[in-house]
Structures are given as structure tokens and as C-alpha cells.
Image: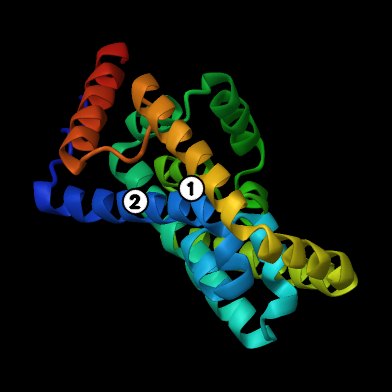
Amino acid sequence: MDEPRPTYSRLSLWLLLAPIIALTALAYAGDAFFSTLATHHPVWLILMNTRKRYLALVSPKLDVVTFFTVGVFRQMLSDPLYFVLGRRYGDAGVRWIERKLGDSSGVSVFEGWFQKAAYPMVFIAPNAIVSVLAGASKMRASVFVALNLGGTVVTMILLRIFGNVFSDPLEAVLRFLHRYQWPLTIVSVVIVAIQIVTSRKKGTSELESVATMEHELEEAQAETEDDE
């Protein structure tokens, strides 16, 4: 006998999706204004977007406590959201993130690796795909958080070491960004705008309304149930 489909309140779903949209918007803003933020407001840059290259770039400008506190905190914000999404929607959540990324082959590769080494994957690469897969696999939340946090801290240590070893080249890059910050900002804003428009046309953008994302998740869930 099939298990009954779990039901959730719309409010709980919106409380899950709204932060994902907000964090995605912040990440785009960080990309658009990274040259100015990196030179004048490095803490804001890594609060908005924690790309590894940004973390390494601003490492020489931040003290150890700030670098680790802000870096770890920001990276740990989004992963649990995707974990809960995977736990709630199962395979439908995986299909949804696959659709958003627009790369079914890439997601399939991650799925194959995850089936063979779930714990190392969460420790080494706790991105959106892996977090959704962890949730869909019914991994214990405590295990997920412990592996995610441990892997994030190790990554931050390695980035800090990198920043210390290559501090002189990184400082040179920061001076370049400071000197040409406005032309670079204009270019990066245009590039980010093109990325947003293109992804929306392809249906792969996470900057959709909560209602739209809710509908997409429900469609993915219906398709998954039809395949069973």
C-alpha cells in the first residue's frame, strides 16, 4: 500500500522559498558590485556572496575572527534551506533543482557520486544540489549539519592559508579593482543583468516569485508521482 502524500501548509513553503529568493538576489548583487565591495566593504561582499574567489580575495583585508565568523555564517545559511526542500519534496525537489540549473547531466553526475559517497559529498561540496540530495535521501539533519559545518570550516581554513601565502598578488588585484572600480562595476552589472534575463527566459532563474516557485515544485512533484 502506497504511503499517503504528506501535506504542508502554504505558509511553511513560503517561509522556505522566500529566503532562497532573497539569498539568490543578494548573491547577484554581490556579483554585480564585487569590485567596489571588495575594496571598500569586504565584509558586505562575503555576506552577500560567498564564492570561493571572493573569500580568498578579501582574506588579507579581514582579521581571522571576522573572516571565519562571517564566512561560515553566510555559507551555512542557504544549505539547510535546500536540505529541507529535498526532505520535503524528495525526488521532485531534485528534479526541480535540476530544472533550475538547466543541466540535467550535471545533476545526474552528482546523484551518481552521492549514491556512492553521500557523507564525503556533503563534507566536501555542500552546494544546492548536494543539499537537496541529502534531504531527499532522508539523511539525518544532525549528520547533515555536522558534515556541512565541518567541511565549511576546513574550506575556510584552506582559503585563509591561500590568502596568507598569496597576499601580495591578492593585494595587487585589490589595488587594480580599486583603480578601475567604476568601469568594472558597469561591466559586471551588465553581465549580471544579462545572466538574469537569460535564465528567466530559460526558466532556470531562482529570482522568481514565491508563487511561481511553489507552482514549479508542485508540477515537479506531480510529474514524479506520474512516473512511479
Q: Which residue is mark 2?
A: 20
149 versus 87 height, above or below: below
Q: Residue furthest top?
A: 227
Q: Position of residue 54 (x, y in %)?
A: 65, 60
Question: What kind of element bears circle 2?
Answer: helix
Q: Position of residue 217 (x, y in %)?
A: 25, 32
Which class describes the residues within 10 Å of circle 2: few (<14), some (14-19), or many (20+)?
many
* Identity of the residue drawn at 47% across and 24% down: 102
Q: CA distance from mark 1 to mark 2?
A: 13 Å
Q: Which residue is mark 1?
A: 131
19 versus 174 height, above or below: above
- What type is the residue that disc 1 sits on? Ser
Residue 9 at least partly seen: no
Q: How many marks?
A: 2
Q: Nearer the viewer, residue 62 or 153?
A: 62
Q: Nearer the viewer, residue 163 or 42?
A: 42
Q: Position of residue 66 (x, y in %)?
A: 59, 83
Q: Position of residue 174 (x, y in %)?
A: 73, 66
Q: Nearer the viewer, mark 1 or mark 2?
A: 2
Left or right of residue 110, residue 77 in this image? left
* Identity of the residue drawn at 28% across and 24% down: 220
Which mark sits nearer the N-terminus, 1 or 2? 2
36 versus 65 height, above or below: above
Question: What kind of element bears circle 1?
Answer: helix
Quadrant (top left/top right/bottom left/bottom right) for the N terminus: top left
> What label sits on residue 205 in the rendered view?
none
